[in-house]
Image (spheres, rainbow, N blue to C red):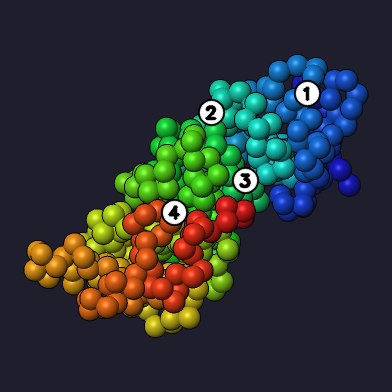
């Protein structure tokens, strides 16, 4: 049974107990047309509604803030079904617009509207991070609206404006504190957080002219502690999403960054070493990616021990991780046609030479 929630100037209908990815939100616009933001047609039309400018977040955030404040002021912080309905509307529509609208249409949402929503998200994540919170104690999201908030960020992390704002507003610093608050994290939130980070990294391949380079994004994530948490959480689930594995492929291509930030005295290097030292994770898909990164840092150390005149010519195959200083092997290596810095042995290079080696940006 649907519950009705009226927020001016539109009328919204939201099912009470469903999962955000399958939730249907029917919005009746002032012109009488009803749209479903869970579809491409509905999301595009809602953003470009001819009856007036897009003001969905600014119109509804004050009401949602009041509901959230009321929940946190109570001793029993469990939200009522109506409160979940009220909050869930905002989080669901934000997520569905990001996931379903065309990129050029989503970009028409005023930046100040997305900024308002990101501010709200950061405040709520900060509340969830507090020392006495259920999250800090258990590493699990206790309440449904908390899950909806976090899961809704996966789609936003594929859109260029929210990504740019996230770095400007230090959103990932807030998310890193949230991820590091509990000693252990449950599978669902761990997967959600890693997918958010992975989507941001992979989006740099789609919006090359509008976002920082992939290497710079990794540097920003590392500086605020988010990359360390990404590594730590990426092995919580027994299986990894394709997006997370693609993110590691992009990370492995950032040679200079790995050389600086994955040594044993750096947070990312320590996280990598700790995971590789756990025999229970030997068959985890992410561990294979981390082994490749570790082998590269080991190769850097070996190269540093060579005489100076030999150091610059010492390369290794990035496809099979083979390292050999013989002149024959070094001559067999071919340079990647995309990044111009990675090298591949002739046998393995057939798959990569002559075309971009980066993974598809489709998640």
Q: Which residue is mark 4?
A: 338
Circle 3 residues within 10 Å: few <14, some 14–19, many ≥20: many
Mark 1 vs mark 2: in front: 1
Q: Residue furthest top?
A: 52
Examine the rendered structure and indicate whether residue 171 appears above or below residue 359.
above
- Residues at discs 1 and 3 in contact (Cβ within 8 Å): no
Q: Is residue 67 left or right of residue 119?
A: right
Q: Dot 2 lies on which element?
A: helix
Q: CA distance from mark 3 to mark 2?
A: 16 Å
- Residues at discs 3 and 2 in contact (Cβ within 8 Å): no
Q: Which residue is mark 2?
A: 115
Q: Dot 3 lies on which element?
A: helix
Which quadrant would residue 263 be assigned to in this image? bottom left
Q: Which residue is mark 1?
A: 49
Mark 1 vs mark 4: in front: 4
Examine the rendered structure and indicate whether residue 196 appears above or below residue 239.
above
Residue 150 lies, in percent from the top left, at: 58, 48
Q: CA distance from mark 4 to mark 3?
A: 28 Å
Q: Is residue 222 left or right of residue 205?
A: left
Circle 1 residues within 10 Å: few <14, some 14–19, many ≥20: some
Residue 292 lies, in percent from the top left, at: 37, 71
Q: CA distance from mark 1 to mark 2?
A: 20 Å
Q: Which mark is residue 155?
A: 3
* For marks 1 and 4 on the same chain, the one whose residue lies earlier in the sequence: 1
* For marks 4 and 3 on the same chain, the one whose residue lies earlier in the sequence: 3
């Amino acid at each position: 049974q649907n519950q009705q929630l009226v927020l001016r100037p539109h009328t919204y209908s939201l099912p009470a107990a469903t999962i955000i990815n399958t939730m249907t939100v029917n919005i009746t616009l002032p012109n009488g047309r009803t749209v479903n933001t869970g579809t491409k047609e509905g999301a595009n039309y809602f953003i470009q509604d001819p009856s007036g400018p897009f003001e969905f977040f600014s119109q509804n955030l004050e009401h949602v803030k009041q509901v959230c404040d009321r929940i946190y002021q109570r001793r029993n912080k469990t939200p009522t079904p109506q409160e979940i309905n009220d909050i869930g509307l905002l989080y669901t529509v934000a997520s569905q617009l990001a996931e379903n609208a065309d990129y050029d249409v989503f970009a028409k949402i005023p930046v100040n509207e997305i900024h308002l929503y990101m501010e709200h998200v950061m405040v709520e994540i900060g509340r969830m991070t507090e020392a006495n919170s259920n999250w800090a104690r258990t590493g699990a999201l206790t309440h449904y609206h908390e899950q909806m908030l976090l899961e809704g960020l996966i789609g936003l992390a594929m859109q260029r404006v929210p990504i740019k704002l996230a770095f400007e507003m230090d959103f990932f610093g807030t998310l890193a504190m949230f991820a590091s608050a509990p000693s252990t994290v449950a599978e669902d939130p761990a997967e959600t957080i890693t997918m958010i980070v992975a989507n941001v990294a992979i989006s740099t391949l789609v919006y090359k002219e509008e976002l920082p380079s992939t290497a710079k994004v990794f540097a920003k994530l590392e500086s605020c502690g988010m990359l360390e948490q990404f590594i730590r959480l990426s092995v919580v689930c027994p299986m990894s999403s394709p997006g997370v594995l693609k993110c590691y492929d992009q990370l492995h291509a950032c040679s200079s960054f790995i050389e600086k930030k994955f040594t044993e005295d750096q947070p990312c290097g320590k996280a990598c070493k700790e995971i590789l030292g756990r025999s229970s994770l030997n068959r985890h898909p992410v561990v294979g990616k981390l082994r490749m990164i570790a082998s590269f840092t080991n190769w850097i150390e070996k190269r540093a021990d060579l005489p100076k005149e030999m150091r610059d010519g010492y390369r290794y195959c990035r496809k099979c991780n083979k390292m050999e200083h013989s002149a024959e092997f070094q001559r067999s290596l071919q340079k990647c046609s995309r990044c111009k810095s990675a090298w591949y042995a002739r046998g393995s290079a057939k798959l990569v030479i002559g075309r971009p080696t980066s993974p598809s940006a489709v998640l």
